[in-house]
Image (cartoon, helix red, strand yellow):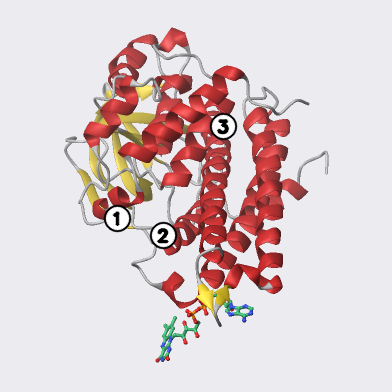
Amino acid sequence: MNFDLTPDQKLLESTMASFLKKESPVTRFRALREDPVGYDKSLWKTMAELGWIGLAFPESAGGLGGSFVDVAILLEQFGAGLVPEPFVASVLSAGTAILRAGSAEQHEAYLAPLIAGDTTLALAWAERGGRYDPTWVETTATKKDDAYVLQGEKIFVQNGHAADVLVVSARTAGTPGDTDGISLFVLPRETEGLRVTPVNTMDGQKAAMITLAGVVVPAANRLGPEGAAAPVLDEIMDLGAAAACAEGLGVMRASLAMTVDYLKTREQFGMKIGTFQALQHRAVDMFIRTELAKSTSILASVKVSDPDPAERRFAVSAAKVELAICGRYVTQQALQLHGGIGITDEHDIGLYFKRMHVLNALFGDEEHHLARFAAQPAF
Ligand SMILES: Cc1cc2nc3c(=O)[nH]c(=O)nc-3n(C[C@H](O)[C@H](O)[C@H](O)COP(=O)(O)OP(=O)(O)OC[C@H]3O[C@@H](n4cnc5c(N)ncnc54)[C@H](O)[C@@H]3O)c2cc1C
């Protein structure tokens, strides 16, 4: 299989890299850590104008019809620059839910403003006790006339603190863990009874705990047939995991580059520390692990769109396990090779370390994906 980028993809990569270098240096992320939103809505609009948001959607839904490999190029650049804009939450999570399950009218109502950069979205799926299982839905949706009443709680909703529109999973039938009986609902932020509590995540970004206290949602806000949303959520979990791998690759590459640069600069005992062979070996090991994560991430990016869920799961879980092992190694070594300065907040390397920890936890950690990989029939 040829993994080389096409000339168009190379152009996309270099254009994004130079744009982000200019418009989104790490100093921007540092400043946004103190901001209640945590990202810049005007830069989000610019990203939309550059076609980055539309890239992930088919032309039939107003997008540019890019592949996931195209999207992965973008995510890798986001990782390298610690870009905090909510691409995964808005586009790959909530956006995909609306794309897959929604009607043409719902695409027009919710995807068109997203693709234009006028809104951001969030997908509220995770619940206490559910680990990484999107079918663990205790939140209920009870039909009442031409509406549903939603009752329950969602945790660590990415971009839940600032999204204009939320997509929420709720159970219209069955019990937690059942595949059947899960429905998706679109809720504008100002919906009565929707309580949003922002939380800081360890990487300096933000999320939200959400309570649905008797929220009344018109039946017209349901996405797709009642009770049939589980396959959509299953696909979104894989998209999210593949996205974490691509972003994590950017984090690893940036960490490696910063560390090699530091080894060439920092002097101890009258010489550059990069001349010490023990440190050269570590840098080589960091490079090898980065390349390994790259290979599995590329395969996951290709396979995540495979119509066969088993093919998709196999490649995505393999990549997510490699991300956990390699990403942890590379960012830990990066801190170690920076010495004492590496653990201070003033130095950027720690920001990459923390982001990697969060990426490892998002959409299934190492343990989860190892178990899922081993459970695949092809293993
Ligand atoms: C939380 C914290 C508290 C601290 N408190 C104190 C304190 O109270 N008092 C105090 O004096 N200091 C303190 N320090 C500083 C600490 O002593 C230094 O951080 C530590 O000695 C490492 O030195 P450095 O940061 O200059 O790293 P560097 O010397 O720059 O080392 C960077 C990397 O190069 C490696 N390296 C360096 N020299 C060699 C070599 N010859 N061969 C092979 N590898 C090499 C190191 O192992 C490391 O991986 C503290 C540090 C931290 C993080």
Q: Is mark 1 within 8 Å of ligand 1?
A: no
Q: Name which residue lies at 65% across and 70% down.
A: 275
Q: CA distance from mark 3 to mark 2?
A: 30 Å
| Residue carrying label 1 | 30
Visible residue check, residue 138: yes
Q: Name which residue lies at 34% across and 53% down.
A: 205
* Circle 1: element type: helix
| Residue carrying label 3 | 235
* Circle 2: element type: helix
Q: Quadrant of residue 9?
A: top right
Q: CA distance from mark 1 to mark 2?
A: 9 Å
Query: Marks 1 and 3: which is nearer the front?
Result: 1
Residue closest to the far front: 270
Residue 130: x, y in percent?
A: 50, 53
Q: Are marks 1 and 2 in contact (CB under 8 Å)?
A: yes
Q: Name which residue lies at 42% across and 45% down.
A: 81
Q: CA distance from mark 1 to mark 3?
A: 33 Å
Q: Name which residue lies at 34% across and 20% down.
A: 111
Q: Nearer the viewer, residue 8 or 314?
A: 8
Q: Type of residue at label 1?
A: Arg
Q: Earlier in the sequence, mark 1 or mark 2?
A: 1
| Residue carrying label 2 | 351
